[in-house]
Amino acid sequence: MMWFLLCTLVLITMVSASSKPHIILIVADDLGWNDVSMNGANQIPTPNIDALAFSGVLLRRHYVLPTCTPSRTALLTGLYPIRTGMQGYPLKAGEPRGLPLDVPLLPQRLKELGYTTRLVGKWHLGCMKSKYTPTQRGFDSHFGYLNGYIGYFDHCVEQKLENRTQVFYGHDFWRDLEPAWEEDCKYATSVFTEEAQRIIRDHDKATPLFLYVAHLAVHAGIYNRMEVPSEEQARNRFSYITDPQRQLYAEMVKTLDDSVGDIITSLKESAMLNNSIIVFLSDNGGMTEGLHANKGSNWPYRGIKFTLFEGGVHGVAAVWSPLLKDRRRVMSQLMHITDWFPTLYHAAGGDPTMLWGLDGVDQWEQLLADKGNSSRQEMLLNIDEHQNNSAYIYDHWKLVQGSYEGGEFEKFLGDSGRDDSYPTYSAINVVQAASRLGLDYELNEATVLRLRNEMAVNCTMREDTLGTPPCADYCLFDLRTDPCETRNVADNNPDVVQMLQARLRYFNEQLVPQLNKPVDNRSDPANFNNTWMPWLDNV
């Protein structure tokens, strides 16, 4: 009798686990708002990303952090980075800090629900000791790199020390905690795609899968190179783009788009697609100019990566799943990157009310079907006490206090993607991609064009109205009438300014000081066979 009950319990557990949806989270690095054609630009066609988005739900007001480490912290913890001291400058190679070990991460919570958890690509949340690396933080496996970026072919990264005269250089490519030297000379986007496809192909379908694909694309490579499989092919394919660097960038976006299509195809061929949730998003805005510039475009938004203007924090995002009851629509309600933690936990069968103390808001019901009212009314964009800048959104109001590096990048930058010389947008290509990938056989050209029109941002830019530096003190913007942040309306709305400043003070009182530290001389890859690795394990 006891044996029968035990077998029954095991069977129930297996059925319950197999019915949970597979979750595939694809994150692009430094992808600009205007670099995917679903948002209205004709310059760089992205039919696979478009097909995913138009067949699912497009997120019109999805916000992220202005740089990579803070965004990935928010994504995997469900917390604003100020809770963990990770709100500052992105983690440098050789910097002795990491995401605090007492903070539970999304893969850990999903493992409690029976998921197999895999990370492919970028980590960037700390590696000074092995216990800070992915396989010690909830992932069953990791294939990729530990620092902020690598070369697309050599998989190496260099780090200048604070004295600016000394440089550390080494290899950063891993399978779990073993260097993956055998992958050298292979193009990173392709390697990560092939690994994701292998994981899907070999996965035990009786167990739900959480696959986090954190691409290097479209971050600039080592030495600011825009690296592509074939430069000649890139020049020919995108000859209508006049900027030679953006030609290469466009090719990098294309390989990213191809990767999305290949991953979806593998899910379809493995009979997993019909029980999957696929999320695509960018970690922050494009880096048009400056350090690690990739010529990404956030047009028509103001600002770029590192800034708290829309170009830096208004991110590309979409979600697809057959579980969504109301698809082929634009969700205009506010959503923040921290929301994915409770949202995906809920979708996986967990009770989000048991996740105490999160800043993220469960949006699963809102994604399933349009509920009208928003699950979220306000959000903290960031507080950087070193740069002395911060930003907060309440409904359609946005307060920006202070500027980044004197406001150098808080202007309008990037290509519009709407020149007459660019190809005409092909809705039929998107419809065909959606059908070929098994995403939506009912999608039609009229629906694609309608949704694309809803996603396009239209506003009149008035750079002459901006001070120098802009918002050195504070600016208030009405995003409902001025989504591109061209008019500071603070003087006309003092009550709103006071309310939002009070909210910033509230969060500032809870802020954990930044954990940033100088690069540790002991991390020099020359000490470890020219490899970046956990260097404090024996300290």
Image (cartoon, rainbow, N blue to C red):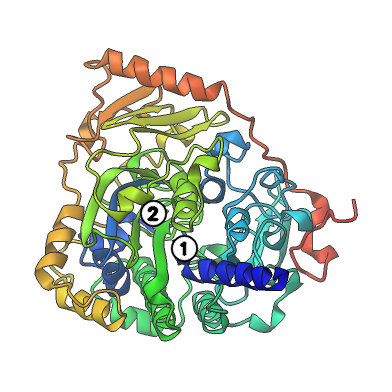
Q: Position of residue 270 (x, y in %)?
A: 45, 84
Bin the neighbour count of mark 1 within 10 Å (Cα to Cα): few under 14, some 14-19, many 20 and up: some
Measured as percent of width and height from the top left, residue 40 is found at 20, 60
* Point 21% across, 16% down: residue: 492
| In this rendering, the label closer to the viewer, 1 or 2 | 1
Tell me which residue sits at (71%, 68%) in the image. Answer: 2
Q: Nearer the viewer, residue 10 or 194?
A: 10
360 to the left or right of 419: right
Position of residue 139 relative to residue 285, above or below, is below
Distance CA(mark 1)–CA(mark 2): 25 Å
| Residue sitting nearer the eye, 222 or 133 | 133
Measuring from the top left, give residue 163's x and y in whole percent: 72, 45
**At which x and y percent is residue 536?**
84, 53
Element assignment for label 1? strand
Q: Which mark is residue 41?
A: none
Looking at the image, residue 139 sits to the left or right of residue 435; the answer is right
Q: What number is the disc on residue 288?
A: 2
Q: Is residue 76 visible?
A: yes
Q: Which residue is mark 1?
A: 25
Mark 2 residue element: loop
At label 1, the amino acid type is: Leu
- Residue type marked 2: Thr
262 to the left or right of 145: left
Q: Relative to residue 110, is residue 48 depicted above or below? A: below
Q: Is 254 drawn above or below residue 123 in the view shown? A: below
Picture residue at 58% right of the left edge, 28% below the top = 511
